[in-house]
Amino acid sequence: MNDLRLRLEAMEVLIFLVILLLCSKSGQCTRNATKVIVHTADHFYEKMLSGKTCFVYFGNRVNPTISLFIEQLEKSADALEDYGISVAKVNCTNEHVAKYCTGEKLMKKAYLFRGGDVLKSFDIDTVFDVNAIVSHVLFTVLFDEVRYVHTTAELQAVETAAKGKTDVVLGHVQVLGLPEHRALMETAFVYGAKYQFVLTTGGPVLKNMGVEDPSSLAAGLWFLHCKGESQSPHADACQHTALRRPLTTLHIYTFLQLMEAPLVSEASVDPSEVKVLHSHLQVPLLFLFSQPHTLALDRVTAQTLAWRLRGQVGLVLIHRESPDVKTPLEYNAAYKLQGEGSEVKYLALNNLEEVIELFTDGRLPEEDYDDEEEGYENWATLDVLDDEVAESVYRDRGQSPDMDAVTELTSDTFHSAVAESVHLVVLFYVKWDAVSMAFMQSYIEVSILLEDAEISDVELAVVDCGEWTDVCSSQQISYFPTVRLYRPHEPAQIYRGMLGTESMKRFIMLSRLVSPFPLFTPEEVTSFLEGDLFQKHSAIAPVPVLGLFSSITDPGISVFNDAANALRGETMVGLFADRRAEQWGVEYSVTLPAILVSRGPEGQTEAHSLYLSTPEQLVTHIQKAQLHTFPELTVENLPQYLELKKPLLLLFVGAEDSGQESRGALEEMRSLLNQGRLDRYMPCWIHLGRTPAGKAVLEAYLGSLPILPALVLSHVSTGEVFHYPAGSPLMVQPILQWLQRVDDREELPAGVIGEEKWEPPVPFFDFLGVMDQEVPGYASQRSPKTKSSLSEREHKENRDTQRGICSSSERQFLHGAQNSNESPTTKPPVAQHSEL
Amino acid sequence: MKVMDSCLLIFFTLLLTPVHSFTDGNNSQNSTRHHDYCVLGAGPAGLQMGNFLSRCQRDYIILERNSGPGSFFKIYPRHRKLISINKIYTGRRNREFNLRHDWNSLLSDKPDLLFQRVSQELYPDADDFPKYLSMYEKELGLKVQYGVDIGKIRASDSASPRGRGYILADQHGLEYTCSVLLVGTGMWDPQKVQFEGSDLVEGYESIPVNPEEYKDQAVLILGKGNSAFETAQSILGRASRVHLYSPNPVRLAWQTHYVGDLRAVNNELLDTYQLKSLDGLVEGGLEEIAIIRNNEDEEKHSGIQKKRSSRKKEKRVQLYLTLAELLEHPVGKNSSNVTATNLPVYHNDNFSLRRPYDRVIRCLGFRFNFSIFDGSARPPSNEGTRGRFPGVTAWYEGRGTPGLFVLGAAAHSRDYRSSAGGFIHGFRYTVRAVHKVLEQRYHSIPWPATRISVIQLQSWLLRRVNEASGPYQMFGVLGDIILLRGSQCEYLEEFPIQALPQFPSLSGYKLSKNGFLVLILQYGLNRTDSLGPGRAESEWTRAWRSSFLHPVLYYYDTLPTENDMRHRPAGWPLPRPKAVHHMVEDFLTEWDGPISHSQPLRRFLEHCLHTDLRAFYAESCFRYSLTHRKPPLFCRQGYLRNHGVIGNSQLWHHAREAGLMPGDQEFASPDMDPLLPNYLNRAGASVSSSMNLDF
C-alpha cells in the first residue's frame, strides 16, 4: 500500500493545471468501438477538469509488448465503465501532453486520475491484463473503504471496531492483480457500504482463520459475523464462515447473500414444497424433522448444524406435526441438492457428524462449479474402455462363452488328459485378459467346426491359469493366451500363428499329419506336388514343400526332419529320400539335396538347393521360399511380406470395379514382375472387397479415396507415399517411367506415413497429485529433522503417556489409573471427563 | 516352480565351477561337523529354511536341542488352541491363493504337504503343529540333528581358512562350524518386568491350566495381549474377578489389521467387561507398581475383623497392587510392615484395583535368547521392540554379524506391530526371501526372475494381485519388483522392499534407465472406524483412500537411497515414488474388473513405460502397419510376428459400435467377387483368406 503514496506532488499538479488551463479547447471524446477513449491532448485536459476518474495510458504503439497492453486496456474499458471509470489512451506520436508524453517513464506507466489529481501511477507490468487493471484501479479507488491488514493485531482492531455494527468480509489473495483480486474488489465496490472489507495477502492472519499452511492457499474469503457480537473491549474474534468455492464475483455475491439468510428456516410443508432463499441461490438444502415436544431441543440441534454447514448448506426445520408433511416417520432428515430438478432424498441419521460428513466428505455430488464439472466429465470418460479388444469383450459380457464345447482341465485332470489324447490342444488363459477372452470365442468356434467335421482324434481343452496356477507354472506359461498342442511322448508344440478361427483350424488340421511326410515312390511325389495326395489339405496348405535327398543316409535329413517338425501345423512338408530323387534334380537343374516348392497343378514349382546348416535357418528358408512374388495382401499375410522390408508397390483393386481394368492392371504388373524389373520393390495388391481395412489405408495414404484401381508406392522406411497419376494408363512402360521419376526425386509424395510414437492415449490418473492436493504433506518425504520413523514415534508417545500416568505425584497417579480404568477404546463423552 | 529351476541351475554351475569357497571346503574337511549352513532350531522357520537348502542340495544341518521339531508348540500356547487360521474351504482350488487363508502350512513343492492333513479345525489344537512339522521334516527328508543343545556361539576369525564363520558348541563340548548361521531359535524367554513384589507373580509359562484351580479366585493378569486374554478366557467361568493391567489399551487385531494384537477368538473378556460382569481392563505402568502380600499379622490392626476372618481363614494369600512410591522403603518378603498408607485405597477411596487378588499372573510375551551368543556373534537388541528382538537388516542378517541371519519369529523386529513377519504365515515367505539372498551372495545365483513382454505385464500383475500369497501375508514388507527394460521386463517375486537400496547386490540384477516398479499390498493408512459407514472405497479414482488390503504400485526411475528410505512419508512403506498407483480395495479381493481395476492399471503402466499398451485386433494392426512407420507395441509384438488377434464379427461389431474401430466399411463376403480371373488368385494366394474363395 506504500505504492499509494505515489501520488504526484502538489507542485507537479499545479504546473499541470496551468498547462491545462492554457491549452484547453473544447472537443468531444471520440469513441471507438472498444470504449477506450482516444484523447487528443485537448480532450485529455478537458477530461481532467470534469473531475471524473479516468485511467489513462500515454504512449505510442511501437513494440509488441505495448500492443498487447493496449489490447488489454481496451478490454478493461468495458469492465471499468460499470464503475464509472473511463479508460483512455493518448497517442504521444500525434499529441503532446507535457510531462506524460516525455521522459523516461513514457510508455512504461499508466495513470489513474481523479479530477486533476493523479491517484496513482502503475507500471504496465503490474497492470498487465484486464483483471490486473480492474483490480488495481478499483483497489486504488476504494483505498479508504478496503482495509489492508497484515498482522493478527491489525485484524483484531478491525474486528473490535466492527463488533455490534457491521459484519466483516476478509479476503485473501496471495498475489494482487489476479482474477480473484478483481472479484474481491468488484464485490467491495458494490457492498463496500454494507460490510467492512479487509484484504490480506497472507501470513499470520490466515492462521487465525484456521488455514494450516497459508502458502498453499492462493485465495480465500471469510465472513466474520461481527455485527451480532456484543461490543466488548475483549479481543475475542468474531465467529467466521469460510467461502469454500473459488473466488469469483458470482460465488462471492451468492455467499454474501447466504450470510444474510436466516441460519435456520422453519417450515410446515413437505421438503419438496419448501421455498427459501437457498433454493434460488443454488445451494443444497438440509431438512430436519421436528416433533412438537422436542422442538426446543431440535432448534438447538439445527442451529448447531447450521453453524457448521453455514455457507454450504441451507438448513430447514420441518414441523412434522403439520398435516402437509408427508414424510414417513422412519426418516429424521432429508436433503435436496442444488439444481432445479433435483429430488429430495430421505435419510435416517444418528448423529451430527454423519450429517456433516454427508456434505463435507464429498460423498454427495459436488456443487457444480465450472472447473470441477470439467474434471468430473474428464474422469467419467476415463471410465469408458478405450482398448478395442477389452471394450468389445466387455460389451459381450452378457453372453458367456459356450465352455461346453471345450474340455476344462484342472490340476487333477491335466496330466492324464495329456497322456491319453492323440492330439490335445490346450489354451492357457486368464479371464481378466481381454485378448484371451476374445480368442476364447474363436477357439470355441474351432472346436465346434471340428466336431461338425467329425474329427475325433483332436481334443480341444482350456486351462484357467487364474485357478490352476500350478499347472500353468509347471508348463512355464508366461504369455496369455498360449496355445499348445500335446501329443503323447512328444514335447509340446507351441502355436505361433494368428489367434483366429481359420488359422487355428488350419494349424490343427495340418498338425495331424506327420511332418515330414515320407514318400516312397515317384508317383507319390508327383501326386504330393500336385496336391492330389492330400486333397483335403490342399486348400489349407496350398504350397506344399518337398525335400529331395538322394539317399536315406544323407546327413542333411536329420536337419530337414527337425525343420519339418518345427513347421508342422504351418506347412505341409514331404520327404523323398531315394536314388530316384535325382530325376527332379535334373528336371529343375538343382543339385540334391534340394526342396521343391509347389504352387499347385497350374502353378509353378520352384526348386532350391539346400545348404543350410541348422534347422532354424532351414525353417526360415522354407518360409521365405513359400512367399509369393506378387501376393494379394490380406490382414493375415501382411506380416510375412513386411518382413522383407522392401518398399511396397501396392495396387489397390476395388470391390465393385474389379472388371476389365483391374484385371488388366494386375496383368501388367505381372509382366513387369516377370521382366525382373521390380526386384527392388515388394509388388502386391489389396482387394478392398475382401480386405476392407485397405480402404482406410488408401485414405490415410492419399487423404481421400482415389479412382480404382490405384497404384501406390509406399516407402515405409522413409515415410513417403507416391501415387501413380490417376489419369495414366496402368501399363508397363508408364509405370516404369513413373518409378524412375520417383527415384530421381521428380515426383512429389502424395502422402506421408505417420511417425506416431504411440504415447499413452490418455494421461494416467496422478494419485500423487491428488494426495498432494487433498492431504498436503501426506505423500511428502519427511524432512531430515524428524528422524524417528512412525513406529518409533508411536512408541515414544506411549512411553510419554505411561510416564504421565505414573510418575508424578501420588494423587495424579491415582487419578490417572482411575481415568484409564474408565477409558474404553472408544472416546468417552467429553463432558463427563472435563477434568482431563 | 521357479526356485526349482534356479536350483537345477545352481547344481550345474557348481559342477562347472568348483572354484567356489563353498565347495572346496569339503576337501580340507577332516571332521563331518563343518557345514556351509547351520540352521539353529527345528521349528517352523528352521524347517522352512531346511526345505529350501535341501532343494538346492546345499551342505546344511539343522540343529535342535529337543527330541522333535516345534517343541515350543508342545508347551505354548498354554491353553492349546492355535489362533492361526486353518481355512480349508475357500471355494477355490488355486493352491497359491489358498495359502492366503492357510496360516499354518510351510512352503514346499509338494502340493499336499499342508497342515490340513493333520487338522481340519479352523483354530487347530496346538499338539497338531509339532505333528505337522514332523511330517514335513520326514517327507522332505530334511537333515535334522536332534538332541544337540547349542550353548555357545562365537564367530571365527575372518583370517581363518574358511573366512568368517561361526563356531557352535553343544552341551557335550562338540563343536560345529559353519560359514553361514541361520538362527531360527524363536522367542523362548518370558518377558519379565522387575518391580517390588514381582517374585509373587506367576508366569504364563508355569501357571496351572486347569480352570478349577482358579475357583472363586480374584486374578490380576499383567498384560493385554493374546496370552493374557487366552488365560483370562480359560478361567472366566471359575475365577471371581479377572482384571487385566498393562500400560497400553487393548489393540484389537480386527481394527489394527495386525495379527499380533488381540484376536477376536480370545476376546470374551471384553464382553464381560463391557457388560459389567466383574471383569475389567486397566491401564497403568508396570515398572512403577508393586505387589505386596497381606499376611495374618495385618489383621491385628482391626480386632473385629480378625475374629471373623481367622475363623474362615485357610491360609489364603492376599495380594495387593500398589505403587512403588507409596512404599517408603523396600518391603521384605514377610511384608510385616505394610501399613494402610502403603495402599492406594487409603489415598483414593475409589481406586479401581483396591481389592486384593488371589493370584497375579504375568502374560507379557517372550523375548529372544541373546545369552547363547558370544560378544563376537551377538546381534544387537532392537530398540523399537524394547530390546525383545535382535536387530536385523532389511534382509534379516544380524546387524554387525555378517553371515548370521535371523529367521522366524525372532526376525519380527523388521515389521513389529505392522505385518506378519513374526508369525508362521508371514515368515515362511521371508525365509524364502533370505534363501534367495543366500543363493545370490554365496552361489552367484541371481534372484529367480521371469522375463516377460511389457504387453503381458498387466496380466501378470493382475495374476499376482489375485493369487500371490507372499505379498498378501507379508503386506508392506515383501513386494514384487519389475525391472523395466524397454519392451521387455524382468519380474522378480517377493523381494524385501526395505532392502531396495541394496537391490542390485542382493538380487544380482542391475537396473536400467527405464526404472522399475514395486508391487505390494498394503492396508489403508487412514484408520477410520473399522465397522462404521464409509469404511470401504469403491471408486477407483479414490483408491488411495482404500482402508483394506489393496495392491499398490510404486514407480521409481532411480533406486531409492537409504536416506530416501529413512525419510519416506510418515506411515509409508516406501519413499515417495515418481508415480504411484493404488488399485481400489475389493470386497472379494478379486482385482479383475475391466473398468475399476484393469484399465486404470494399464494407464499407469503406460505412463511409466511411455507407450501405448492397448491391444488391437489384427485388422487394426494391418492398418497401422501400413500407415505408420511403427505400429503400436501390441501389433509389433503380436501381429507382426504372425500372432495377431483376429477376433470375430461379433467382437468387431462391438468395437465398431464403441467407435474404437473404423466402422464405415462393410465386411467382405467370401463370394462377392466372382470376376477376378482364376490365375490371379493363385498368383497372390493369400494363405488363409482365399482358401474358401471360389473364383
Image: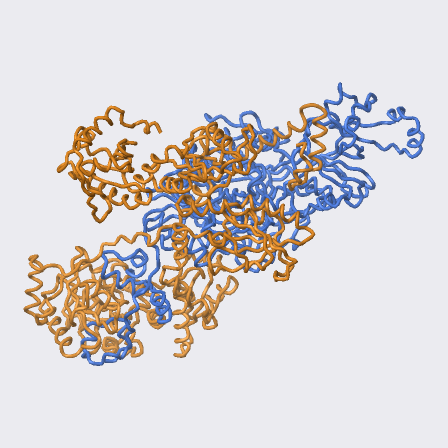
Chain colours: A orange, B blue
Q: Is residue A816 toward the left or the right of residue A96 in the image? A: right
Depicted A557 relative to depicted B403: above or below: below
Residue depicted at x 29% and y 42% = A130
Which percent across, then down, holds residue A595? 22, 67
Q: Is residue B214 toward the left or the right of residue B411 in the image? A: right
Residue depicted at x 83% and y 27% = B294
Which percent across, then down, holds residue B368? 61, 33
Exactly how many numbered labels are in the figure?
0
Quarter of the figure with the N terminus of chain A: top left
Q: Is residue A593 visible?
A: no
Depicted B88 relative to depicted A633: above or below: above
Please identify the quarter of the rendering in which residue A291 is found. bottom right
Which percent across, then down, holds residue A590? 15, 67
Depicted A420 relative to depicted B249: above or below: below
Please identify the quarter of the rendering in which residue B597 is found. bottom left
Q: Is residue A95 visible?
A: yes
Nearer to me, A634 or B684: A634
Q: Residue furthest top?
A: B329
Nearer to me, A437 or A266: A266
Please identify the quarter of the rendering in which residue A81 is found. top left
Q: Is residue A790 toward the left or the right of residue A380 in the image? A: right
Residue depicted at x 21% and y 73% = A599
Quarter of the figure with the C terminus of chain A: top right
Depicted A759 relative to depicted B303: above or below: below
Which percent across, then down, holds residue A604? 17, 74
